[in-house]
Amino acid sequence: MRPLDTHDRTLIDLLTRDARLSTAELAGYLGETPENVLDRITTLTTSGHIAGYRAVRGFPDPDRQPITVLMFIERNQALSGKDVLRSLRTLPELVSSDVADTGFDLLLRLRVETEARIAEIEAFFDQQVGVTKVTVVRPVSSVEKH
């Protein structure tokens, strides 16, 4: 695998902030042709630097507001945990994930539609090799900066 250059890093940063940017817009930022940008995106995707794209569904219906939960995942420190981290990519409800240095290993913020889905995700992590405990916390209030 070739090392990332400055344009690769810039491209990943731009797509992380707004994955809807067109190749023409990205090309303008990078000073490259849209074809070269598309080739870079393809290479970054096949090499694993870009894991995928996702659409996060909005909740315009006031009666169906999303449920925000925090999920604390504790792991057996003797195991690498790469499978657990890799499985995060499969969760469209994932808002953010942080690796912690004490007490628990992962802190996930999720927005889900139903309590049943929370239980499914909790069971999903509970069954993973190396996970010793999953704790779900429902915040009483949150402040989000937009």
Image (spheres, helix red, strand yellow):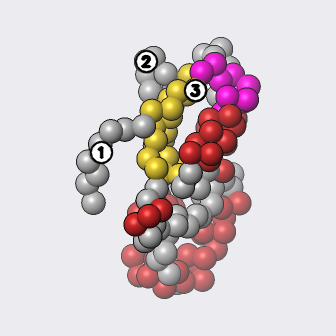
**Residue at the image position 59 percent from the left and 64 percent from the top:** 53
Q: Label 2 to label 1, Cα distance in Å? A: 23 Å
- On residue 28, the disc is none
**Category of crowding for the residue at label 1, using alpha-carbon neighbours closer than 10 angstroms: few (below 14), some (14–19), many (at least 20):** few
Q: CA distance from mark 1 to mark 3?
A: 21 Å
Give the crowd class for mark 2: few <14, some 14-19, many >=20 residues within 10 Å: few
Q: Nearer the viewer, residue 134 or 15?
A: 134
Query: In percent of the image, x 29 and y 42: which residue is there?
Result: 141
The numbered disc on residue 102 is 2
Q: Quadrant of the C terminus?
A: bottom left
Where residue 32 sits in the image (x, y, percent)? Answer: 48, 79
Residue 131 visible in the shown view: yes
Q: Amino acid at mark 3?
A: Val
Find residue 115 and report its horizontal and vertical position in percent: 56, 45
User: To which residue does mark 1 refer?
Assistant: 142
* Quadrant in the picture for residue 92: bottom right
96 vs 144, nearest the viewer: 144
Q: Indicate the amino acid at tag 1.
A: Ser
Seen at 45% across and 17% down, the residue is 103
Q: Magenta includes 14?
A: no
Q: Residue at x 68, y 55 (%)?
A: 47
> What residue span does the magenta drawing correspond to?
125-133
Relative image position of residue 104 (x, y in whole percent)? 49, 22
Query: Where residue 29 sits: x, y (%)?
Result: 39, 76
Q: Is 44 above or below relative to 124? A: below
Q: Which residue is mark 3?
A: 134
Q: Secondary structure at mark 2?
A: loop
| Between 8 and 61, the one nearer to me in the picture | 61
Residue 73 figure quarter? top right
Residue 53 vertical position relative to residue 80 in the rendered view, above or below: below
